[in-house]
Amino acid sequence: EPEVTQTPSHQVTQMGQEVILRCVPISNHLYFYWYRQILGQKVEFLVSFYNNEISEKSEIFDDQFSVERPDGSNFTLKIRSTKLEDSAMYFCASTERTGGKTEAFFGQGTRLTVV
Amino acid sequence: SQQGEEDPQALSIQEGENATMNCSYKTSINNLQWYRQNSGRGLVHLILIRSNEREKHSGRLRVTLDTSKKSSSLLITASRAADTASYFCATDQYGNKLVFGAGTILRVKS
C-alpha cells in the first residue's frame, strides 16, 4: 500500500542551526502539507502546497520556515535558525483531493529536538 | 476559537466494551475525518464522513455526523487492548487544511 515516508525519524539540532525535514508524498497525490505536534498538544497545520506553490499557511509558518518540492518526488520543510520552541513532531501529509478523495495520509513524522 | 474539540479527554474501558468518543466543531465543513495515533507515532487515517452523510461504518468503527449540532461521534465496538491510542477528529473546512481537535486518549485494559 502506498505511504508517505519521512526522513529522518528523529533529528537533534543545536539552537540556531538550520534543519531540513524530508518527505516523499504518495506519488499520485497533488496536495502536500506539513503539520506539527508539540508534545502533548494537538496537531497544528503549518502549510499546504499545490502546483509548486504555497496555497495556505498558518500564523506559525513565519519567515523562519520554507517549503520546497525540489524534484518530482520530495517535499521538504526547512527551518532556519531553530529555536527551542520548534521542538515538536513534524508530520508530512498528502491527498489526492480530486474526485472527492480528500483523505489525508500522514507520514510517521520526524521528531525534532532543539537543544 | 478552537475547532474539533473531542470529549472525553481520556477514556479507560475493559476489553470487549464499546468506546464512544465525541467531537464538536464550529464552522461549516466539507468532511470530518478520524485519525488514530499510537504513542509517539504517526497519524493513521481511520474513516472519513462527508457533510451530506449521517453515518458510516468500517469494521468495528461507526461514525456519525450531525451537521445541525456540528458534532460527530466515533464508536469502537468490542474494543481490544490494541485499540489503546489517541483518537483525533479533524475537519476539512473547504480550505487547504485539516483542523484537528485535542484528541481522546483511549486505554483498553485487558
Image (cartoon, rainbow, N blue to C red):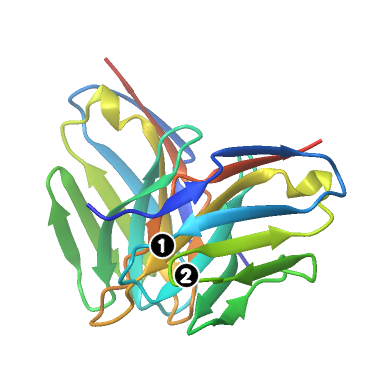
Asked whether the residues under the numbered discs 1 and 2 touch, taking CB atoms below 8 Å apart as contact, a structural biologist would say yes
> From the viewer's perspective, is residue B17 above or below residue B25?
above
Q: Judge the density around disc 1: few (<14), some (14-19), many (≥20) Cα neighbours within 10 Å.
A: many
Between residue A13 and residue B39, name the one nearer to us. Answer: A13
Residue at the extreme top of the image, as rendered: B110
For the residues labelled 1 and 2, the Cα–Cα distance comes to 7 Å
Residue at the spot of label 2: A32
> From the viewer's perspective, is residue A86 above or below residue B16?
below
Picture quadrant where residue B65 is located: bottom left
Q: Judge the density around disc 2: few (<14), some (14-19), many (≥20) Cα neighbours within 10 Å.
A: many
> In the rendering, which numbered label is found on residue A25?
1
Under mark 2, the amino acid is Phe
Q: Chain of mark 2?
A: A
Q: Chain of mark 1?
A: A
Q: Circle 2 sits in a helix, a strand or a loop, which is it?
A: strand
Which label lies toward us, 1 or 2?
1
First of labels 1, 2 by sequence position: 1
User: Residue A17: x, y in percent?
Assistant: 83, 49
Under mark 1, the amino acid is Pro
